[in-house]
Image (cartoon, rainbow, N blue to C red):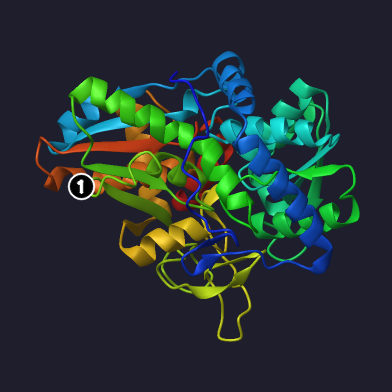
Amino acid sequence: MTALKSPLPNTLPDSAGFYGDFGGRFVPDTLMAPLAELEDAYNKAHADPAFWADYERLLDEFVGRETPLQPMHRLTAQLGGAKIYLKREDLAHTGAHKINNAIGQILLAQRMGKKRIIAETGAGQHGVATATAAAAFGLECIVYMGADDMARQEPNVYRMRLLGAEVVPVTSGSRTLKDAVSEAMRDWVSHVHDTYYLLGSALGPHPYPRMVRDFQSVIGREARAQILAAEGRLPDSIVACVGGGSNAIGIFSGFVDDAQVKLIGVEAGGTAIAKGQHAARFSGGSMGIFQGMKTIILQDTDGQAELTHSVSAGLDYTGVGPEHAYLQALGRAEYTYALDDDAVAALHRLARTEGIICALESAHAVAYAIKTAPALSKDHLMIVNLSGRGDKDIGILRSYEENKKS
């Protein structure tokens, strides 16, 4: 792996945490001081080569980086168009990209002297990554998870508990990720003196979107070097699923300054683009304030968050990370969606064609590739970020298919 300094220029966000009109820090007064403490600690770590050396060492030794950039020979031949590569984040330790961020923030928590780690999780992969990192560092870990997500992601709940984490069910609201975030923030307010909130995606109040992007930017740096080595040129398009947006912003960061590389984010289209049936923020959302940030959210005419739906727990979220909102507003990135049925079909096709069972979240990006690649030329290079593996989704798939038959 190429030696790290600070991974990205400190130009975005601005000093107030804004990406253009999006981002910022919209929290109760009780959280302003801990967020300022966190920002100060991260600014110092960001400028410290020793911090990044420790991070790089753990990515090598513990996470198992770098992850491969694998050509999809059979899928490309079947589709007959663009040449497709997968960035295999599913092969990182714990089975998803989430561990990149968990390791970085655990190092920061240790640097700050925090002994108690809290986190939120939707699909459970961030919870597993946090529990894994906390166990490796001997820290107490509490994970908040929506009760509905706990039911549909039971294997990951068991993994977190096996790693020594306490998993707290959240029964308020929609009983999914947005409610888990709210509960984690309430906990943090009550225990700021000894607690570190390890937020899992590129969202929330500043400095979290910046920190998560920085820790996930390893995906983009690796993918850039790997495609240049394999093809001698940059790709034509990068595709990634977008819930909060951490895997997407991670890989986008490696190519965002290359105007010729198209950046495509794929949200959860659910069963239909209709109220309460999807989580495609750019296909029905509007600007608002949500969980500490100004961004694009799904909300009603009174500004209340709407219910969302996705077959994938990790994409089932009301808002999108502010840097994605900024990239969309600039026209630098394009955001579309895949329906539940298309994501499930893509998961099956990838499994049977390439021997890879991906996460339902990642399957949304694969579905986009399957849909669009045939119309592209054979010299078009497309990288799909495969953010995680699908072990956790076997039960969901079984139930989904049984319901389709009935």
228 sits to left or right of 363: left
193 sits to left or right of 108: right
Question: What is the three-letter code of the residue carrying label 1?
Answer: Gln
Which is more toward the observer, 190 or 132?
190
Which is more toward the observer, 346 or 105?
105
Is disc 1 placed on a helix, strand or loop? loop
Residue at image x 33%, y 46%?
367
Q: Is residue 338 above or below residue 331?
A: above
Image quarter (top left, top right, bottom left or bottom right) of the N terminus: top left
Q: Is residue 356 above or below residue 349?
A: above
Across and down, in percent, residue 279 comes to 50, 62
Residue at image x 61%, y 17%?
62
Q: Residue furthest bottom?
A: 302
75 sits to left or right of 320: left
Q: Is residue 184 visible?
A: no
Q: Quadrant of residue 98?
A: top right
Mark 1 closeness class: few <14, some 14–19, many ≥20 residues within 10 Å: few
Q: Quadrant of residue 116?
A: top right
Mark 1 — residue? 260
Which is more toward the observer, 88 or 60?
60
Residue at image x 73%, y 47%?
38
Q: Is residue 256 visible?
A: yes
106 sits to left or right of 294: right
Q: Quadrant of residue 87?
A: top left
Across and down, in percent, residue 318 comes to 57, 64
